[in-house]
Amino acid sequence: MRNFVLAISLVVFCSLSMAAQEVIVSGSGDFKRLCEGNTLPSEEGWTVVKKNVAAGGLTPEIWCGIARIRKAEKDYIATLAYGPIRCDDMWRLSEGLVIFNKGNKYSALCLVDGKWKQTMNGYNCRIIACGHADGARAQMLVRDKKGFFSWIDQSGKHLEGTPEHYDDAVIYRARGDVVAVNTAGKWGALASDASVVVPIQYDTLFLTASLRKWGGKWADANWFYVREDDLWGVRGDNGVEALPARYGDLSYWPTAPDTWCYRMPGGKWGMMDSSGTKVLPEAFDGLSPYSFNAYVSGNLRLPVAIVAGRGKERALLNHKGKELLPYMEDRNMFDMLVMFYPQNSFSVFTWNRYKLWAKGEFESTADFEARKKNPSLNEGYIASLIPAAEKAFVSAIIGDDARLILSRYDADSETFVFSVNKIFQDTYKITVPRSDAALFREEFSSFAADALKTAKYFVRNDMLSLRSITFTTPEGKTFSFDNPAAEGYSRPWLRDLDLIR
């Protein structure tokens, strides 16, 4: 009895002490100051641990919602006209629903008519960070001592209309809380109010990468990969079956807007947009969206790109199937070219340098608006920029530190292999008779720099290539290289990049 009286006295004393410090307040202005720590003087030993825990979406009168405060290494909850409550930790499940615990006992605060009300007290079960409140009603996902998951209401009873338990649960928070659940070996998904948003019928279910668009519109749902009978599809938590489960494989990347790579069971890969419109035929041994390395690319606007496999060869395509890099067998060379593609692409350079998505410096507003609506006008405008762009591109790639590299000599064909260090996709052969080969190599460093100053270049396969160069030895002998690939070359054109805006 003595202990009971002592406990009551301590509660009364603490309440009075806190009231004097304005820790328990009823006015929204005072409570806002509490959340900001202004009414918790440090000399009194109070600190704010968390503030505005349940503030999202609430009216200004209850702007702060709830705060966690600490004194003497013990935590308390202070709320608008409710509290303090001793706790070890606290967290928000949804607007108007806050969970706190003391040891293994969990309790809930629910927002009712602008005031916080304790709706569950000392529930001996692990509450999962997923739940929903609707006025005085609340439902929360919990995990019992056997490891099973289930839903309870604000009184701690099993939530009516939900299964007795789920075998497993995974929470996602991409666009609002949604939880994947497993029962009897099948997966589905539930919203935070325990409603079913993806039927519990799939062998596998997990959240996709964040989708940018769906059917040409910005995505407003969580999208899940689902597998049924070893076939894959996509479903949204808005009830939409976006792609039926009939594909052997599916691949999506956030940088490929509204685009999916897919493989038919036992067949080839193709590509479509999310409306089901086919972009590439089912004619590839592999298709995979490619994400450029932002560190390598710097501040460039990057193209959408897809690596396509065809036998032993691979190519880099845009999302419309046009080649950004041609098919090649050399995997190491291909990987290097892909990695540095944004830096070495004439199309990317021109797109970024002249900001082709915006009004040009010497372009009137009327002309800009007209070419946006007229593809032929847009093509004419770009064509007018190409000569200056090509010259600027050569200067940007070659820079001040370009150098020539002399490699092996083939005595049978009497040719040296050489390259330019800034053009790493190409090597070239120049004819040097065997009688001059030894001296040519020995003196190469003395005349290479002068030769490079007068070298000419052109754009091939959207990248810089050497057109011609002439070497003059100290003895006055000249050796020239002319690139046969430049025959008939006029001006480059921009790839259809469809760069991300």
Image (cartoon, rainbow, N blue to C red):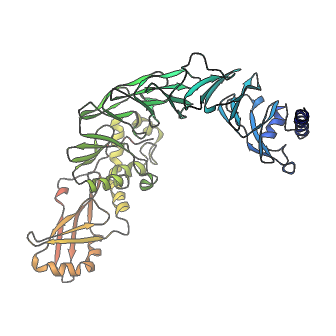
378, 58: nearer the viewer: 58
At 62% from the left and 28% from the top, the residue drawn is: 131
Residue 411 position, x and y percent, is: 10, 73
Does residue 73 appear left or right of residue 448 in this picture? right
Please say if 436 is above or below 158: below
442, 231: nearer the viewer: 231
Q: Is residue 299 visible?
A: yes
Residue 190 position, x and y percent, is: 52, 25
Q: Is residue 64 visible?
A: no
In which image quadrant can residue 458 be found?
bottom left
Residue at far left of view: 412
Residue at far bottom of view: 475
Please say if 143 is above or below 327: above
Residue 242 position, x and y percent, is: 40, 25
80, 320: nearer the viewer: 80
Please say if 298 is above or below 67: below
In which image quadrant can residue 243 be found?
top left
Figure quadrant of the N terminus: top right
